[in-house]
Amino acid sequence: MSPIKIIDASGQCHELPRAGASNLMQLAVNHNIEGIDGECGGCCSCATCHVGLSQQDFERLPAMHEDEQALLEYVPNSTPTSRLACQLKLTDIPEGLNFNVIS
Amino acid sequence: MGNRQKIVIIGASHAGCNAAFQLKQHIPGIEVTLLSDESCLPYHRPPLSKALVKGEVQAEQIQLKSPSAFDEAGIELRLNYSVKEIDRKHRLINGELNYDKLILATGGAPRPVRIPGLESDKLVYLRDMSDTLALQKRLENTQHITLVGGGYIGLELAASLIQMGKKVTLVEAASRILNRVTAAEVSDFFQTYHQRRGVHFLIGQQIEQATLLQDGRASLRSSDGECFITDLVVAGIGMLPNTYLASKAKLETDNGVLVNQYGQTSDHNIYAIGDCASYPHPDHPGLRIESVQSAVEQARITAAHITQQDFKPHDLPWFWTDQYDLKMKMAGINTGHDATVLRGSVSDGQFSCFYLRNGVVIAADCVNQPGEFMASKRLIAQGGRVPAEMLSNSSISMKEIITLCHQSK
Ligand SMILES: Cc1cc2nc3c(=O)[nH]c(=O)nc-3n(C[C@H](O)[C@H](O)[C@H](O)COP(=O)(O)OP(=O)(O)OC[C@H]3O[C@@H](n4cnc5c(N)ncnc54)[C@H](O)[C@@H]3O)c2cc1C
Ligand code: FES
């Protein structure tokens, strides 16, 4: 599958090969992407793995678990198309999506 | 010096590892050497008492970074490297490694417990990867475990062990579990939750005497005279910051290495971050916080200071604990509160406990309420008085409360 495109906190675009991680937070942390800290290790507690998508891209992802939804409701700068990267399995991310780091 | 500064970091866990990557992010040309006396790659510590001990994840799955990330970032990681000495005059580690700036990120070690009659091989601690892997192995032929200490690590272990089908007795010397950290209502809730799942509690008691039995088990006697037989004792009564190196190098210490708001010790070329550092929180001077978030925040601030970057001040402290299907998240520091307010349903295991001082929310414990936790962080950071009747009323949303409380400031 093609790499995943992610635009970091300072606007730089990275293309990350889908390897060495099981979810998008881990992948971003492994590549040292600015703005993705993954403090809680992916247990849906910290929201330091906040990403945004276009409406179209957002709809192509699997639905959110209620914990993710509840956390995102109050996360600073959250939008209706925000996600937590640790909750996105690489195998569930379709081709051609663009993620923006929100910090 | 400038961009070619040589930075040495002692300890490669949440604090040290994050500092290393942040430094490289700010100035790619900076030289960073990261030293660890452990033999494995840096890893997330919280799963030790949770998913890892239960075998739900493997050691490689909780690594902080992928194995190649250090090389790729240009960080020199040395495992199995124990620092014995800091020579401040010559800026030299173990007589062989030079530094321009040194970061101590040495964490802490379990506070030792002494139980008369108990041999050291029956008494273990849980602080690092090797402890956890050793414990896991021993659990294979262990039925009954006695936990000493009813803090977060003890309770998380109790939950994990029960889920693994073990029998558990938990001994707490204070008058309730989580005594120093939560309100009585929250302690009671957790105790009941554990009791329903089979944990036997000895509260307000200590193990006074142990006798080894012929079959290899131990018979323990508590201060109230209760006797029981156990296979293994695991102690979790807190930790002591690793300040040995700092003291030896004559840096100022007092329940941790004393640092200023940038993490600098009494020697301005040496910083200390994470569990080993006593950081001057504006509202809580002298409080040494032990949490992943605090370690990461201090790493961020110190890395920015060394590379002369701007940085945001320390965020509101927060912490989490997972036990069974309970996820509790705590925001703020509740020391000095004069009232508590409950919101939600304690009996359903979905509630928050707010801590107020002079009518202002200063901290919150949120059990299975991730949204309320995030909202509380905002509410606390914003300050402002909140009427207790409003907080306890679940039909008023946290959004409304935040807005109203903002207007009332
Ligand atoms: C079982 C357990 C569960 C936890 N659960 C949670 C949780 O759910 N949420 C949370 O926020 N926090 C939790 N914590 C606390 C959290 O893990 C710590 O606050 C955090 O690890 C602190 O990071 P640190 O880098 O400061 O220190 P540490 O993680 O202690 O790392 C210090 C490192 O330095 C090394 N070192 C020490 N001295 C030397 C030397 N002389 N030479 C070389 N290396 C040295 C040590 O071996 C160690 O690897 C938990 C801790 C434990 C033990
Ligand atoms: S890494 Fe903490 S919520 Fe995603």
Image: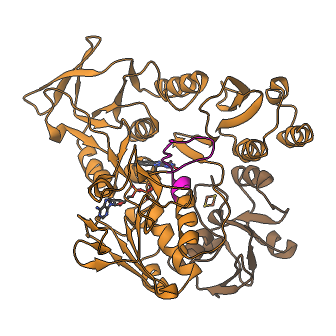
Chain colours: A brown, B orange
Q: Was residue B284 drawn as part of the magenta stretch in this picture? A: yes
The mark tally for this picture is 0
Asked if residue A21 shows in the view, the reply is no
Residue at left 10%, top 31%?
Answer: B215
Q: Is residue A4 left or right of residue B115?
A: right
Q: Nearer the viewer, residue B400 or B233?
A: B400
Q: Is residue B125 left or right of residue B398?
A: left
Q: Which stretch appears magenta?
A: B279-295
Asked if residue B409 shows in the view, the reply is yes
The C terminus of chain B - image quarter = top right
Q: Is residue B336 above or below residue B312?
A: above
> How far from the left and from the top, in percent, is residue B304?
58, 71
> How far from the left and from the top, in percent, is residue B140?
26, 46
Q: Is residue B306 above or below residue B194?
A: below
Q: Was residue A103 drawn as part of the magenta stretch in this picture? A: no
Q: Most extreme residue toward the left, as rendered? A: B214
Q: Most extreme residue toward the front, as rendered? A: B89
Q: Is residue B137 above or below residue B218?
A: below
Q: Nearer the viewer, residue B348 or B212?
A: B212
Q: Is residue B5 above or below residue B245?
A: below
The quarter of the picture where residue B393 lies is: top right
* Magenta stretch prevailing secondary structure: loop
Residue at left 90%, top 43%?
Answer: B403
> How far from the left and from the top, in percent, is residue B246?
33, 57
Residue at left 57%, top 46%?
Answer: B319
Q: Nearer the viewer, residue B154 or B3?
A: B3
Residue at left 38%, top 39%?
Answer: B238
The quarter of the picture where residue B249 lies is: bottom left
Quadrant location, ligand no. 1 = bottom left
> How far from the left and from the top, in percent, is residue B146?
30, 30
